[in-house]
Image (spheres, rainbow, N blue to C red):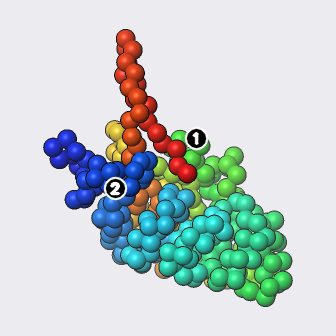
Amino acid sequence: MKHFEYRGGNLFAEDVSIAEVATNVGTPFYCYSASTIEQNYEIFSRAIAPLKGHIFYALKANSNQAVIKTLANLGAGADVVSEGETRRALAAGIPGPKIIFSGVGKTRSEIKFALSEGIGQFNVESENELKFLDEISREIQRTATIAIRINPDVEAKTHNKISTGRKEDKFGISIDQAKSLFVQAAKLELIKPIGFSVHIGSQLTTLKPFREAFSRVAEVVRLMRKEGFVVSRLDLGGGLGIKYQQEQPPNPKEYASVVSQTLGGLNLELAFEPGRFLVGDAGVLVTSVLQEKLTSTKRFVKSFIEFI
């Protein structure tokens, strides 16, 4: 982990003693390194700079208000999946136009709130959601800018529970449906379709699934443009993995190279939604040891981790 190290047997976050923090505030608590978050952001930002891409931090990775504020100060937008996350992003100083509302279960009240705050983009997951969004937009007379989320049917080669781009997954819609839904959306008065979104999973440690997914989305863009539609943005989601033990995930520069090879000639505005990569190695949970129990084979340590 960056900016966390032991000095004389004591753990430090940057130049701050974790033991001293524990003495002052008690346990349990989470401790985050702003320097780690800033460094991770800079690494990712430099990698996508030639692509004219924009970072929208995925709040699902960590919705701590100080973490969001740190990223907001760096210029990040936000990827949210609920009204609660939207409110946290706004409170951290991220303006509505720099917020993307994703998620498969947007409620009527959440959509109304997001529209009233001028949210920059809704990622539409289904035909029913588009109808829902159209109704609410006409009801309150607010235009909804949208991207149609494509399910490219790509195996992300990550844990089954965090794979989101296979045809059996609940996220997004098939490529053929996505094309017809874009056409349908373009006919609606207060719906403004600008492109497509894709997210195939989290903690990916190989580039091949990204290449497959982005290549399929690129073909959709070319086809829609050939039919006369304006496609100006792609939301490429997140998913770039980090190292926990023996993993060797690709770095952001290698990832950006795949984006350039598959999408670089399309002159698109690109949105990226990293989460884990920005904050996954930026914090620790600190607890107090209550009891120790030794058996013939193991040593057990009991800690207090209840938060009130």
**Which quadrant would residue 276 be assigned to in this image?**
bottom left
Asked if one can make out residue 200 in the rendered structure from this viewpoint, the answer is yes
x and y percentages locating residue 146 in the rendered image: 67, 76
Q: Is residue 293 left or right of residue 135?
A: left
Q: Where residue 272 sits: x, y (%)? A: 48, 68
Q: Which one is nearer the viewer's eye here, 205 or 176?
A: 205
- Relative to 12, is 197 on the left or the right? right
Occupied quadrant, residue 299:
top left
Whether residue 206 is visible here, answered yes or no, is no
Q: Position of residue 247 (x, y in %)?
A: 36, 42
Q: x, y percentage for residue 99?
A: 57, 75
Residue drawn at 75 percent across, 77 percent down: 112
Q: Please name the amino acid that badge 2 sits on.
A: Asn
192 to the left or right of 108 = left
* Kind of element beneath mark 1: helix
Disc 2 packing (10 Å; few <14; some 14–19; many ≥20): few
From the image, tell me which residue sits under label 1. 160
**On screen, residue 17 above or below 67:** above
Q: Residues within 10 Å of mark 1 (few under 14, many from 20)?
A: few
**Which residue corresponds to the image point at 33% horizontal and 60% vertical from the top-left?**
33
* Lower position in the chain sequence, tag 1 or tag 2: 2
Q: Residue at x 70, y 80 (%)?
A: 115
Q: Nearer the viewer, residue 273 or 148?
A: 273
List the single residue furthest toward the top: 296
Label 1, label 2: how far apart the Cα atoms are: 41 Å
Q: Residue at x 38, y 26 (%)?
A: 292
Q: Determine whether 51 is above or below 127 in the image.
A: below
Instruction: Write down the residue under mark 2.
Output: 24
Label drawn at residue 7: none
The disc labelled 1 sits on which kind of residue? Answer: Asn
